Amino acid sequence: MRNYLTAECYKLFRRKYFYLTLLGALALEGVMLWGCWFTWSQGNSRMDFSSAATTIVMLMSIGLYATILSGDMVFSEQYKHNTMKNEVAYGIPRTRIYLGKLLVSTLAALIAAVVMVGAYLGGCWLLLPHNEADQAALAVIGYTLAGALPLWLAAQGVVLACYFLVRNATLAAFAAVALLGAVPSVFQLCGMLIHPVFEVIRQFMPAVMLERLPNMAFQWDYVGLCWIVGLCVLAGATVVGVLAFRKKEIR
């Protein structure tokens, strides 16, 4: 497993895809930082570190869909260049292939998250004034990240299952968006038209839990629930993906 993970990491980090995607995201963050600094420089005293930094709390849902990019980074060329077929033909166990790509895509997502969050908070710290609200802002951000992480992991599991089971990378991405974003809306509609149990189930979907997270500040039992749901979804998606991939014909 170690050798396979090393090979997958080598393929990921030698490609420009990861670095260009991260650079593009950092450029967008730079625009946000410039906007915050410009607002403060024009005399808006309400723009400070705490108000700018806590903006990140409202953007946590982006991480849910960013997992599609990290999944695509390790999977986009598998069918195009028949590397998946070669790996299977070489005798690498399919479970190892699946788990290896899941771990490497998760590693890519975590590295990107650390860099982006660190760069944004660092920029806010350097460019904007500080006050007594800084500590509270950092506490809220820490709380939100603690709850968002397992939900991002769940999304990564769903995304990888889509990439393994749908042969076309574009269709796999659309399938992941549908499962992560559209299904909660469908369940909401079913809850209103058919039975309230659909709405109850909807409340435990990663996208919905992530949306509620900023409004549940410092309710650590909710963070615990996020971890339970996130790990269960991750495990469920992985089991389904591995079992289906074992039976899939690779052409």
Image (cartoon, helix red, strand yellow):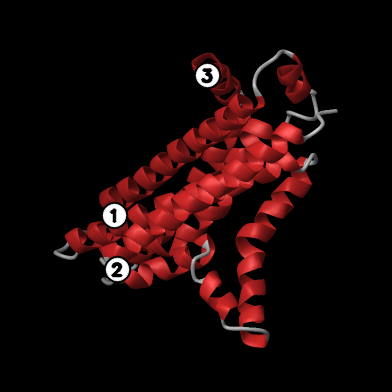
| Residue at left offset 38%, top offset 47% | 117
> Residue at label 2?
217
> How far across and how far down the image is residue 203, in percent?
50, 71
| Residue at left offset 44%, top offset 36% | 111
Q: Looking at the image, is 61 positioned above or below residue 121?
A: below
Q: In the visual, does 20 lie left or right of 135?
A: right
N-terminal-most mark, 1 or 3: 3
> Residue at label 3?
1
Q: Quadrant of residue 89?
A: top right
Q: CA distance from mark 1 to mark 3?
A: 33 Å
In the structure shown, which secondary structural element does the residue marked by tag 3 occupy? loop
Crowding at mark 1 (Cα within 10 Å: few <14, some 14-19, many 20+): some
> How far across and how far down the image is residue 49, in percent?
27, 59
> How far across and how far down the image is residue 101, in percent?
59, 30
Residue type at the position of mark 1: Gly
N-terminal-most mark, 3 or 2: 3
> How far across and how far down the image is residue 163, in percent?
69, 41
> Residue at label 1?
142
Residue type at the position of mark 3: Met
Foreground: 85 or 15?
85
| Residue at left offset 60%, top offset 69% | 184
Foreground: 219 or 93?
93
